[in-house]
Image (cartoon, helix red, strand yellow):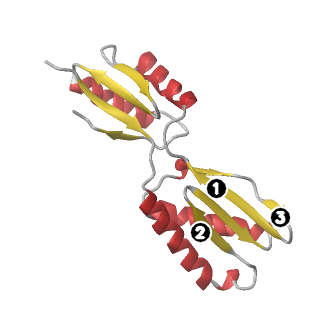
Amino acid sequence: MADSSFDVVSKVDPMEADNAANQARKEIDQRYDFKGVGASLELKGEQFLLKASTEERVKAVLDVLESKLIKRGISLKSLDVGEPFASGKEYRIEAKLKNGIDSDNAKKVTKLIRDEGPKSVKSQIQGDEVRVTSKSRDDLQATIALLKRADLDLDLQFLNFR
């Protein structure tokens, strides 16, 4: 019998991120507490740029963005948020969507599978994802449960289970 496998990935649907940004922009334009403070939100590729006249307002813009991302099914673990900084007369926050599993986190995932997963399970890093294989599908499902329970700084998805 051939080995069963699945891929562990960390990806954000760009259309969902765009929809969340558009919804957040609409709310920022309509809310009374954002009138006259220069609050704005831009999305370029995977990079968000939040602007407002005070540090508190720019943090409120970030809060609106985070709530819209959650509503669109995007985990906040996928958002890498910088610190607020002054730029001229306004404050800015730069936030970036994390796509793919970087090599350090991929090593953590494979080490976790090797140390705590079923013994028949093998894992290997393939670019920005991790391929997990085993003869037993039950062991693969146990591995998925293990990774879901693990406290990693990643939003993991499990694809191509076959």
Q: Residue at x 50, y 36 (%)?
A: 101
Give the mark nearer the N terminus: 2 vs 3: 2
- Name the element at disc 2: helix
Q: Residue at x 61, y 82 (%)?
A: 29
Circle 2 residue:
64
State how far apart marks 1 and 3 are (Cα). 16 Å
Q: Residue at x 30, y 23 (%)?
A: 133
Can you say whether 149 is above or below 42 in the image? above
Relative image position of residue 157 (x, y in whole percent): 39, 42
Relative image position of residue 150 (x, y in whole percent): 47, 33
In the figure, residue 36 lies in which quadrant?
bottom right
Specify the amino acid type for callout 3.
Ser
Q: Mark 2 or 3, which is nearer the eye?
A: 3
Q: Nearer the viewer, residue 27 or 11?
A: 11
- Name the element at disc 3: strand
Relative image position of residue 81 (x, y in whole percent): 65, 52
The extreme top residue here reads 119
Can you say whether 25 is above or below 81 in the image? below
- Name the element at disc 1: strand
Give the mark nearer the N terminus: 2 vs 1: 2
On the rendered image, what quadrant is the C terminus found in?
A: top left
Q: Mark 2 or 1, which is nearer the eye?
A: 1
Relative image position of residue 71 (x, y in whole percent): 45, 64
Specify the amino acid type for callout 2.
Val
Give the mark nearer the N terminus: 1 vs 3: 3
State how far apart marks 2 and 3 are (Cα). 21 Å
